[in-house]
C-alpha cells in the first residue's frame, strides 16, 4: 500500500531523513530488517513486535515506511494510519542467517528491490553491498568467552583442548588489568595453535582466531562478521562489559552463537539472559566447583538459562561434539 503524494515527497528527501518502522514477531527477522534498513542509510525509528508496539508511545511520530511481518490487525491499521506513511509493506519471506552468505544477500536484495520499485528510488539498486557476496567467511559459529578473576588458566585449558581447525571464531571479553592486558595473548597462545590478539582496529572474525576485547574502548559486532572498534568507553563498572557484548552478539548471530562464561567475580553477563534464550543462542558455564572464582559462572547457572556446565576441557569437547551433531543434523534428509 502506498500514498502517491507522500511517495513523491519522499523522493525529495535524503535517505537518512527517510524514517522506517519495522514490526516483526521473529527476533532474527527483526535483526535482518534492521541490518538492511541501516545499510542503506535510512533512519530506523523502531524495530519491534506487535506486543512491544502496543507499549510504545508513537503520538505525533511521522513514519515514512512501515515494514510489517506480522498480522495486519486493527491495532496495526490504526498505528500505520496515524503516522501518515508513504508506504506500508506487508509480508516477507524468512531471512536466512548471516552465515548463509549468498542466501542472506539475496534476501536483502529482494527487500531492496521492493523498496526501490515502490518508491522509485533506483539509487537503492545502484549501490548494493556487493561485499556480502564476495566476502569469504571461513566460520559457521561465533563462540563468545567471558571471564574475570581466575580466567586466564581456564581459557588457556579450553583453547589447549579445542582444535583451531573447527569452523568457529572466538571472541573473548576478560576483566583484566589495563596495564597488563597486553600479556594476555602470550599467555593464551602458549602450547596451542590458536591465534590470539587484542582488538586494536575494526576487523573481520576469522576461524582459528581469538579476538580479545580491549579494556578502554567498546566493540560491537555486525551481521557481516565485522568487529567494529568504537571511540567510546564501556558503560558501567565492568570493562569490557561482558553483558553488553553478550547481548550484541546474540542479537546478531542468534542460534549460530555459543556463549561460555568462565571463572570470575561478580555477575557481569547475567543481565540479558532471557534475550539470549529468545535468540536461541547457547549458554554454557565453567563448573563453579573447579573455578578459581565461582561467583560469575554460578550467577549464570542460577539464572536457569544455562544449557551445559563442565570443566574447561569438557566445555571444549562439548563444543566439538555440538558442532559435529549440528552438521549431521543439517546433512540428514
Image (tube, rainbow, N blue to C red):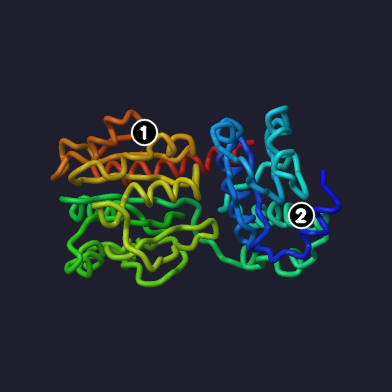
Residue 177 falls left or right of residue 204: left
Percent position (x, y) of residue 222? 50, 58
Question: What residue lies at 58% left-to-right and 46% top-to-bottom?
Answer: 46
The N terminus, quarter of image:
top right
Asked where in the image residue 173 lies, by quadrant, the reply is bottom left
Residue 14 position (above or below residue 111): below
- Determine the secondary structure under disc 2: helix
Furthest-front residue in this view:
60
The local crowd at label 1, few if under 14, some if 14 to 19, many if 20 or more residues have their Cα within 10 Å, is: some
Asked where in the image residue 260 lies, by quadrant, the reply is top left
Percent position (x, y) of residue 65? 71, 49
The local crowd at label 2, few if under 14, some if 14 to 19, many if 20 or more residues have their Cα within 10 Å, is: some
Asked where in the image residue 271 lies, by quadrant, the reply is top left
According to the image, label 2 marks what residue?
Answer: 115
The C terminus, quarter of image:
top right
Furthest-left residue in this view:
292
- Determine the secondary structure under disc 1: loop
Residue 173 falls left or right of residue 20: left
Residue 200 position (above or below residue 31): below
Question: What residue lies at 80% left-to-right and 65% top-to-bottom?
Answer: 122
Which-is-in-front pick, marks 2 and 1?
A: 2
Percent position (x, y) of residue 151? 20, 52
Instruction: Say which of 273 and 310 sits in front.
Output: 273
Instruction: Say which of 163 and 150 sits in front.
Output: 150
Marks 2/1 in contact by CB < 8 Å: the verdict is no
The CA distance from mark 2 to mark 1 is 41 Å
Percent position (x, y) of residue 110? 75, 53
* Nearer-N-terminus badge (2/1): 2
Question: What residue lies at 61% left-to-right and 43% top-to-bottom?
Answer: 29
According to the image, label 1 marks what residue?
Answer: 307
Amino acid at each position: 500500500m502506498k500514498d502517491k503524494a507522500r511517495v513523491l515527497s519522499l523522493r525529495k528527501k535524503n535517505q537518512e531523513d527517510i524514517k522506517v518502522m519495522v514490526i516483526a514477531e521473529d527476533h532474527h527477522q527483526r535483526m535482518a530488517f534492521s541490518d538492511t534498513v541501516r545499510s542503506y542509510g535510512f533512519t530506523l525509528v523502531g524495530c519491534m513486535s506487535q506486543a512491544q508496539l502496543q507499549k510504545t508511545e508513537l503520538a505525533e511520530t511521522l513514519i515514512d515506511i512501515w515494514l510489517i511481518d506480522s498480522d495486519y490487525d486493527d491495532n496495526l491499521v490504526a498505528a500505520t494510519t496515524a503516522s501518515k506513511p508513504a508506504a506500508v509493506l506487508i509480508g516477507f519471506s524468512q531471512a536466512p542467517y548471516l552465515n548463509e552468505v549468498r542466501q542472506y544477500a539475496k534476501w536483502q536484495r529482494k527487500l531492496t528491490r521492493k523498496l526501490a520499485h515502490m518508491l522509485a528510488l533506483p539509487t537503492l539498486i545502484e549501490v548494493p553491498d556487493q561485499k556480502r557476496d564476495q566476502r569469504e567467511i571461513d566460520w559457521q559459529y561465533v563462540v563468545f568467552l567471558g571471564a574475570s578473576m581466575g580466567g586466564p588458566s581456564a581459557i588457556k585449558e579450553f583453547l589447549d583442548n579445542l582444535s583451531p581447525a573447527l569452523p568457529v571464531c572466538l571472541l573473548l571479553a576478560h576483566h583484566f588489568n589495563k596495564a597488563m592486558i597486553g600479556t594476555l595473548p602470550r599467555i593464551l597462545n602458549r602450547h596451542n595453535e590458536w591465534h590470539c590478539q587484542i582488538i586494536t582496529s575494526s576487523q573481520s572474525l576469522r576461524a582459528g582466531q581469538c579476538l580479545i576485547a580491549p579494556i578502554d574502548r567498546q566493540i560491537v559486532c555486525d551481521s557481516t562478521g565485522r568487529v567494529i572498534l568504537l571511540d567510546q568507553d564501556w558503560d558501567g563498572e565492568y570493562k569490557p562489559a561482558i553483558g553488553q557484548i553478550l547481548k550484541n552478539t546474540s542479537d546478531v548471530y542468534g542460534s549460530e552463537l555459543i556463549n561460555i562464561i568462565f571463572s570470575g567475580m561478580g555477575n557481569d553477563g547475567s543481565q540479558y539472559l532471557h534475550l539470549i534464550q529468545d535468540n536461541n543462542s547457547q549458554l554454557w558455564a565453567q563448573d563453579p566447583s573447579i573455578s578459581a572464582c565461582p561467583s560469575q559462572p554460578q550467577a549464570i547457572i542460577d539464572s536457569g538459562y544455562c544449557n551445559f556446565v563442565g570443566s574447561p576441557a569438557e566445555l571444549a569437547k562439548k563444543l566439538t561434539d555440538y558442532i559435529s551433531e549440528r552438521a549431521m543434523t543439517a546433512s540428514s534428509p
